[in-house]
Amino acid sequence: KYEISKNLIDKAALVCGSRYRLANLIQMDEKNLSKIWHGRRPLNLVQTIRIATVAGVPIAETLADVHRVHGVSEIVAWFDRVGERGRLVAGNSATHEAQGFTG
């Protein structure tokens, strides 16, 4: 699981230019991203979706690998349970910035 998270962060950092830029883009503290990269902290679903989107990798497969979550209904149910559905949608603006899309 740690290696999957590390590889995912590395792919997204390549798109952004650095882990520092990735952290800023997805509105995460750089120290927390470093802890995840080093295996000292797990990725949560919101972070996983944002990083996978920036990296350009399939979100469903990444969630299955990192969190053992399968299918859109399970993902939406998780966000509803923790009251974070709005954060899932908010992550899309970071994706567009990373890929050079504006307005």
Image (cartoon, helix red, strand yellow):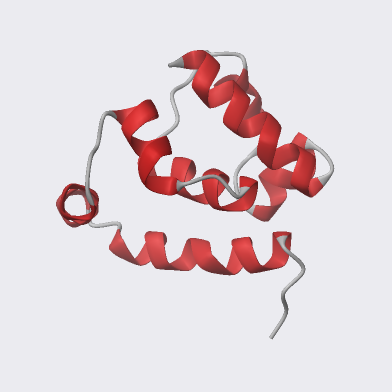
How far across and how far down the image is residue 8, in percent? 58, 32
Q: In what quadrant of the picture does the C terminus appear?
A: bottom right
Residue 27 appears at what percent x and percent y?
61, 52
- In terms of depth relative to the viewer, which is nearer, 74 or 21? 74
**Above or below, 3 relative to 9:** above
Q: Residue furthest bottom?
A: 103
Question: Foreground: 92 or 42?
Answer: 92
- Say whether residue 32 is visible: no
Instruction: Decide if residue 29 is on the left or right side of residue 5.
Output: right
Which residue is rendered at x = 71% and y = 59% of the image?
98
| Residue 61, position as x, y percentages in the image | 39, 38
Q: Is residue 41 visible?
A: yes
Q: Residue furthest right?
A: 17
Residue at point 56%, 44% (across, down): 51
- What residue is drawn where x is 71% and y is 45%? 22
Q: Position of residue 85 (x, y in %)?
A: 29, 62
